[in-house]
Image (tube, rainbow, N blue to C red):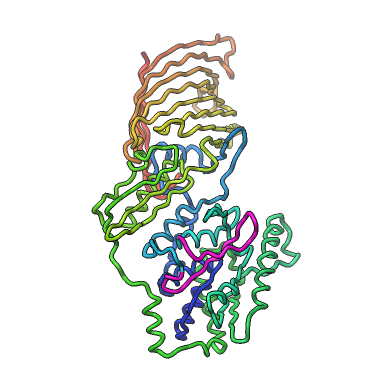
Amino acid sequence: AHVGVIQVLEEMKIPIFCIAGTSMGAIVGGLYAAGMSPADMEKFVTSMEWNEAFKDKPPPSEMPFRRKQDAADYLIDFDLGYQDGKFTIPKGLLQGQNLNLILKSLLIHTEGIDDFNKLNIPFRAVATDIETGDAVILDKGELVKAIRASMSIPALFAPVEIDGRILVDGGIANNLPVDIARQMGADVVIVVDISTELSHRDHLTTSVAITSQLTSIMVQRNTQAQIRTLRERDVLIRPEMGDIGSGDFFKAPEAVAVGRKKAEEMKPQLGHLAVEEQDFLAYLQIQRKKDTEMPVIDTVAVVNKTSLPSSMIASKITIKPGDKLNMAELKRNIDRIYGIDLFERVDFRLTKKDKSSAIVIEPLEKSWGPNYFRFGLGLEDNFRGSGSYALTTQFTKTAINRLAGEWRTEVRIGENPRVYTEFYQPLDYSLNYFVTANAAYLMRNINDYNDDGNITTQYRASSFQFGVAAGRQFGNWGELRVGLRREHGNVKVLIGDHTRPEEPYDRGSVAASAAYSTLDNYVFPLRGSDASLAWNYNL
């Protein structure tokens, strides 16, 4: 909606002296202050793949093959941390990884500007200190980080730490920063209010609705307090959002149209703010960002404060000194690092000194790791009176040494229960070569069928297995393993001739397996292929 309002302001030749914004207002305001045109902003918000923006994980094409296997085995992508005898969870459902990279790509030209007064239009973002509840005015530092802090909806997005303060969405403390605009020197304030109205009791029928209402009450109170300070020449624009909520990013085209419609209705109140054509063209010369070539990178550095070696992180970086900065390639590099799945966030900075430019990669280890639980549920039914289930718990200790070794234990109950433990050790910083050692106790059913497809005999096999293997990952598309396996077990009849004695067995084997996967998604794949091949030779 803010974009639609700015479109009308420019059409009316109304220049903007300064901008203060909160949450979505900080995003749109920050983009405009940094030189983006209303047309480009509309293209951005309407063409954006918001489902990708609100994901943290990179696409499978940038994930190590082991992480692809994890994604295929556990479709619910949630890691429950375990530290010092306590369960821990992330500070937000989303860490903002992809959204941060998108904003950085749009605002790469502001890298190195640490004073928001030096943007094309002076700008302030408003966030909330979650410890004190105070409004925090962000007027310096990294622009993208300030915008991210201002829009970090509690519980949805992880807070952003700036200067030692833990910051979340500014709407809680100052949703409509009229006072900040006045402090910046504004004589006339154009206010765009898209705050959510309080719900009627007929709609307060669930715990979610009640919680949302509490947030709306806090936002409305500080919003109304700011509106009461408006002066006669100020203009208040309230787009009628209808059923477009704060999370309806897929309705961006409708939101732009709603903002535009309301601003056009307010033209009589806005008319006195217009300037002459020549003056407005001079204003646009200042506001619009200038087209500049991407810099040539002289240095690529990793600022590493994690437990993993810098060489492991650097192995995922293909940008070399002497290359011209390519944002698409940089994103792929960061996706590969993030795909190791040990980091809460992987950020970058473009620094310039004299005539040289440097890309600095900054990974941050997960605050709720390095030990994680995962849970899985499987249900199966043949619709002929036979069904089964499997409930699985997996515990993984990650990064147990400098080469990111992992120890994983899995317990499954159901028709085919098992206990499985594996030590997985990469052998090089690129994580291509690895060795494993594993042990398992498992039980499984083996069925004989008649011509009608009915079970005539069902055997129950139980066994202890031990194995070692060595292997190689091929990029992010395949894996090859070769190993030795030892198995001790017995087979007894569950359904059928119970007079048959149990049959113990003891065997060793050489095993080899190959796996290949280029699927674009492991829940609902649309592109790619997946294949696996296993071979065993009993000794």
For this view, does 286 lie left or right of residue 215? left
Q: How many marks?
A: 0
- Residue 296 placement, left or right of 9: left
Viewer-proximal residue, 207 or 137? 137
- 49 or 347, nearer to the observer: 347
| Residue 287 in the image, given as x and y percentages of width and height | 40, 76
- Residue 376 appears in the rendering: no
Which residue is located at x 63 percent, y 64 percent? 173
Can you say whether 364 is above or below 381 in the image? Answer: below
* Residue shown at the point (51%, 10%) measured from the top left: 503
Is 73 colored magenta in this rendering? no
Q: Is 245 or 146 nearer to us in this picture? A: 146
**Residue 119 or 100: which is nearer the viewer?**
119
Residue at the spot 55% in from the left edge and 41% down from the top edge: 368
Residue 71: horizontal and vertical position, in percent? Answer: 46, 41
Task: Identify the residue at horizontal 56%, vertical 46% (top origin).
Answer: 90
Quadrant hosting residue 258:
bottom right
As drawn, which residue projects farthest toward the front? 354
Residue 424 shows up from this direction? yes
Residue 344 higher or lower than 235, as above or below = above
- Relative placement, left or right, of 515 versus 356 is right
The single residue placed furthest to the left in the displayed view is 322
Q: Position of residue 326 (x, y in %)?
A: 30, 57
Look at the image and give the residue range highlighted in magenta: 117-141
Residue 132 covered by magenta stretch: yes
Which quarter shows the C terminus?
Answer: top left
